[in-house]
Image (spheres, rainbow, N blue to C red):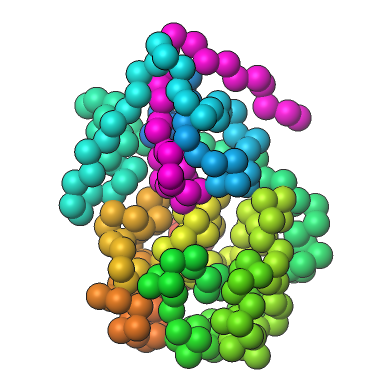
Amino acid sequence: MSPPPVSATPESVVFPLGGLHLGDLLMALPAIAAVRRFATPVISGLQPRHFAAVSALPLLFRHNGPPAARTLLPVWRSGEHRTDGWLATLGAGVEPERMAIPVRGLAQAPGALPGPGWALLSPWADHPPKRWHAQGWQQVAAHLRGRGYRIALIGPRPSAALVSQIGAAADRVLVGMDSPTTWPALLTRADIVVSPDTGCVHMADALGVPVVGLYGPTSAAEYGPYWLRDFCASAPDMASLRADTVCERIDGLLSGLGRQRQDRAAP
């Protein structure tokens, strides 16, 4: 079913995202969801290619916000998560909310990643300082395989050279299958996702898929997956990020998920 049409009203609240990317939109999403309780959120300035994967959200995407609207101007504070920065502009007492993301391509995703037990590794980052070395990814893949997971590698076509250095450790290589109609659906097939600080981290987090984010030049406190920040692996730069640190975070996340399953199964 198509989402209901959305129109700007005098009670519109503008989130100015000019020059930003999908990950920035996803970090604003808990605040955007909160705004929907009392006003119409308008996303301004974001290029269409950066919201194509979430274009089915019941939101207004505009080049500029409507003249009568209130435009949010967050002040970014060191150590404060970007989501909390957006929430602070809305005033005291406004709580973050999850917004369900309509995912396309769900029917086709099982063909690419059939059955359960997938760990999805997304090694690419458009910003080179955010990329981790192939040896680290190989060690993480081996660790996850040792825990019983099947390994899938995903990324855009420019990631092919990096992925080829890791590919022998993978059961599936899905380079080039990151279109807006396939990428979020592939994430939903994963039991765990590992990714540097890119839109992949925030999309997995928004979809409720367990994710371990890898952070070097950016701060996990400020840019980590908002709903699940406790299992990020950080270092001063990606070259000094140790594989055993990443594996420890993976083990911590999987241990926590195991306890949750046990709690749900308890009488």
Vertical side of 19 occupied by 153: above or below: below
Residue appearing at x 40%, y 50% in the figure? 227
Residue drawn 44% across and 66% down?
127
Q: Is residue 174 visible?
A: yes
Q: Judge whether 170 appears above or below 111 on screen.
A: below
Taking the magenta stretch, the answer to whether it contains residue 4 is: yes
Left or right of residue 139: residue 177: right
Q: Residue furthest top?
A: 10
Q: Quadrant of residue 223?
A: bottom left
Q: Nearer the viewer, residue 128 or 218?
A: 128
Q: Nearer the viewer, residue 128 or 99?
A: 128
- The vertical placement of 9 against 58, above or below, is above
Q: Name the residue located 55 percent from the left edge and 47 percent from the top edge.
A: 50
Residue 175's spot in the image, x, y percent? 68, 71
Quarter that holds the N terminus: top right
What segment carries the magenta color? 1-30
Name the spot of residue 202 as percent of width and height, x first: 47, 54
Please tell me how many numbered marks the rendered image carries.
0
The x and y percentages for residue 248 are: 37, 79
Q: Is residue 257 visible?
A: no
Magenta stretch: residue 257 in it?
no
Between 114 and 60, the one nearer to me in the picture? 60
- Residue 11 lies in what quarter of the image? top left
Residue 246 at what x, y percent from top left? 39, 78
Q: Is residue 37 above or below residue 243?
A: above
Q: Residue drawn at (57%, 81%), measured in percent from left and top?
A: 162
On the rendered structure, is 31 left or right of 156?
Answer: left
